[in-house]
Amino acid sequence: MSQQPKVYHLQGVIDTTNATAIKKEVETFIDQAAQPIEISLAGLQSHNSLVVGLMMSWMRYAHRHQVKLVFSHVPDRLFNIIEFSGLTGTLPIVDAEQAAGEHIVE
């Protein structure tokens, strides 16, 4: 029986004014959560390369800490940037059917 991931719900706008704080917040979540971890982008309003850079950073951070990490509910516009950047095979993205669903971390 596989363990259900803890889910971090990334929401709102990410830009240069808050990216560092959000990066650290998710890294803290990775440190404290039991693995595996899912980062849901369903509530994300930003679809830009800054977000893709954060996703890459979190993937590397989780890998260094031996934590399995996936991204779910990636908006189409953001997925297009990921695809254009050649990162579809690099970033661990799951579709809606594979996502954990309503396991919300408070």
Image (cartoon, rainbow, N blue to C red):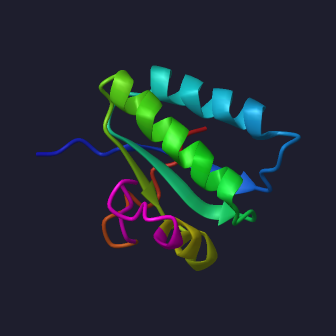
In this rendering, would 53 be left or right of 73? right
Q: Position of residue 104 (x, y in %)?
A: 52, 48
**43 shown above or below 20:** below
- Residue closest to the far right: 17
* Residue at image point 46% right, 29% down: 61
Q: Quadrant of residue 67?
A: top left
Q: Quadrant of residue 68?
A: top left
In this rendering, would 17 be left or right of 9? right
Q: How many marks?
A: 0
* Residue at image point 77% right, 57% down: 12
Q: Position of residue 14 (x, y in %)?
A: 77, 51
Residue 55 in sight from this viewpoint: yes
The main secondary structure of the magenta stretch is loop
**76 shown above or below 101:** below
Q: Is residue 93 located in the magenta-colored stretch of the structure?
A: yes
**71 shown above or below 61:** below
Q: Quadrant of residue 13?
A: bottom right
* Residue at image point 45% right, 50% down: 103
Q: Quadrant of the C terminus?
A: top right
Q: Nearer the viewer, residue 8 or 83?
A: 83
In this rendering, would 82 be left or right of 12? left
- Residue closest to the far left: 1
Q: Is residue 30 located in the magenta-colored stretch of the structure?
A: no
- Residue closest to the far front: 85
Q: Nearer the viewer, residue 79 or 102?
A: 79
Q: Nearer the viewer, residue 101 or 74?
A: 74
Q: Nearer the viewer, residue 99 or 70?
A: 70
Q: Position of residue 77 (x, y in %)?
A: 62, 77
Q: Quadrant of the N terminus?
A: top left
Which range is magenta?
Answer: 83-95
Residue 8 in sight from this viewpoint: no
